[in-house]
Amino acid sequence: MEESNLLSINVWLAGRSYRIRIKPEEEEAVRKSVKVADDKITELRNQYAGKDDQDFLAMCLLTYAADAAIEGNAHNPVFKKELTDIIGKIDAIINE
């Protein structure tokens, strides 16, 4: 896609502004996604006091990646168990 067709927008995530270029027809979906991610980061901040924003961003990313992987591999119980174990280990580290 030509760069001239892209729309520049500013979004706020974890208290920081990010300027991104997207297709105009994607703006609503991108803004909704940023809102969902920012809400998740706020939820994580409330659950795990004392961590820095990088921890919350990483946990948010892991949550969505895990959800996508589980949905894509719902028929694979071995994968689900391994992913659940990994999430449990990360959660334990954050709680330390």
Image: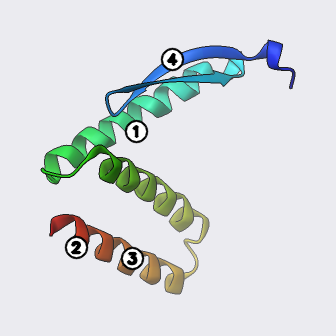
Instruction: Give the residue displayed 45% in from the left and 52% down from the top.
Output: 61
Mark 4, secondary structure of its residue? strand
User: Callout 3, which amino acid?
Assistant: Ile
Q: Which residue is mark 1?
A: 37
Find disc 4 in the rendering and name its residue: 10
Colour pattern: rainbow
Q: What residue is shown with label 3?
A: 86
**Contact, mark 1 vs mark 2 (Cβ under 8 Å):** no
Q: What residue is pinned by disc 2?
A: 92
The three-letter amino acid code for the residue at tag 1 is: Ala
In this rendering, which labeled residue sits more in front, label 1 or label 2?
2
Decide: is 12 above or below 95: above
Give the residue at x 45% y 31%.
34
- Mark 2, secondary structure of its residue: helix
How many residues crowd mark 3 within 10 Å: few (<14), some (14–19), many (20+)? few
Of callouts 4 and 3, the N-terminal one: 4
Image quarter hosting the C terminus: bottom left
Marks 2,4: beta carbons within 8 A? no
- The reply, left or right, for residue 84 in relation to residue 53 is right
- The percent coordinates of residue 56 (x first, y second) are 31, 49
Q: Earlier in the sequence, mark 2 or mark 4?
A: 4
Q: Residue furthest bottom?
A: 78
At mark 3, the secondary structure is helix
Q: Amino acid at mark 4?
A: Asn
The mark nearer the N terminus, 2 or 3, is 3
Q: CA distance from mark 2 to mark 4?
A: 34 Å
Alpha-carbon distance for marks 1 and 2? 22 Å
